[in-house]
Image (spheres, rainbow, N blue to C red):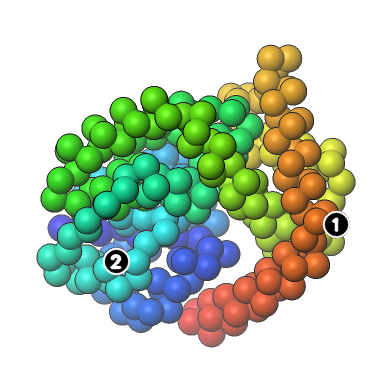
Amino acid sequence: MQHTVYYHPACHTSYSLLKSFNSIKNYAELVDVSKDITPAIVEKVLTVPLIATSGKFVYGGPVDIELAIKYLKGEDVAVDVKDPLESLGIAIVDSAAASSLVVSTGSLKPVLRFRDFIMAATGLNLDPERERKSKDLFDLAEKEEAQFIEKWRKKMVATLAYNLIRERLYLGLKPEVDEETVLLWLEAKTSFGRAGVPYFDRVQNLRVAAKDVYDYIEERKQKIEEKLKNEIEEIKSFFITSK
C-alpha cells in the first residue's frame, strides 16, 4: 500500500510526527502543503498531518503519534472512538480551516460536507465499528448543532487567534492586529478565489466572528506571542537541521 503524509512545517503536530519517525520517508511520500496549495485544494486537505493510503484519507489532525507511526509501518492498529461527537469537536478545533468555516457561518453544515476529513480526523476510519459510529455522529451533529457550536465555539476562536498571529510571525510581521485586519484575514481563510467571499447576507456573521477573534487576541496577546515564538524557534531549528 502506498502511504502519503500531508504536512506543514509550521504545524506542531506535523513537526512532532516527523521528529518522532526519522525514517518516515522510507514508508510514505511526504507532501509539504506549504510549498504548493494544489494538492491540498484538489484533495480537500483540511488538516495536517494527514495520512492517506492509496489515495484515501485514513488518519489525521490531532493524531496519536505512536499510533500513526505504527500504522505507517504496516502494523495492525485500531481506535475505539468512545464519543464521536467529542472527537469531532477536537478535530474541528485542531483545524483552522474547519474552525473558520463553523465560526464564520454559525453552522456545522459546511464542515459536515467534508466527510473524508471527519472520518480521518476523528479516528473513525481506524475504528472497527466505523459504519455504525459514523452514522450516529452525523445524525447527532445535525440534531445537536446549536449545542455543539455553543460548546466548542470559544476553542475554535482560540484556534483562529493563534493561527492568525502564527502566520504573521512567520511572515515577519508584527503580531499586533486591529479588528479590520482580522476581518480581512478571516474572509481570506473562508474563501478561495471568488468562492466563499461574503455578499451582504454573510457580512454580519463574519464581522461578529472577527470581533471575537480580535477580542481573544487582545485579552491574551502577550501569552499568545510568547508561546508561538517558543514554538517557532523549536520547529525552525528542526527543519533547518534536517534538510
Please tell me the numbered disc located at residue 113. Answer: none
Q: Name the residue under label 1.
A: 176
Q: Using the rendered view, name the quadrant where residue 235 is placed.
A: bottom right
Q: Using the rendered view, name the quadrant where residue 189 is placed.
A: top right
x%, y% of residue 238? 53, 81
Mark pair 1, 2: CA separation: 37 Å
Residue at image point 53% right, 77% down: 239
Residue type for callout 1: Glu
Residue at image point 68% right, 71% down: 227
Which residue is nearer to you in this view: 211 or 229?
211
Q: Name the residue under label 2.
A: 68
Query: For the residue labelled by badge 1, is the local secondary structure a helix, a strand or a loop?
Result: loop
Residue type for callout 2: Ala
Q: Quadrant of the N terminus?
A: bottom left
Residue at image point 12% right, 65% down: 76
x%, y% of residue 230? 67, 77
Q: Are marks 1 and 2 in contact (CB under 8 Å)?
A: no
Toward the top, the furthest residue is 200
Q: Is residue 55 above or below residue 140?
A: below
In this orientation, does residue 219 appear? yes
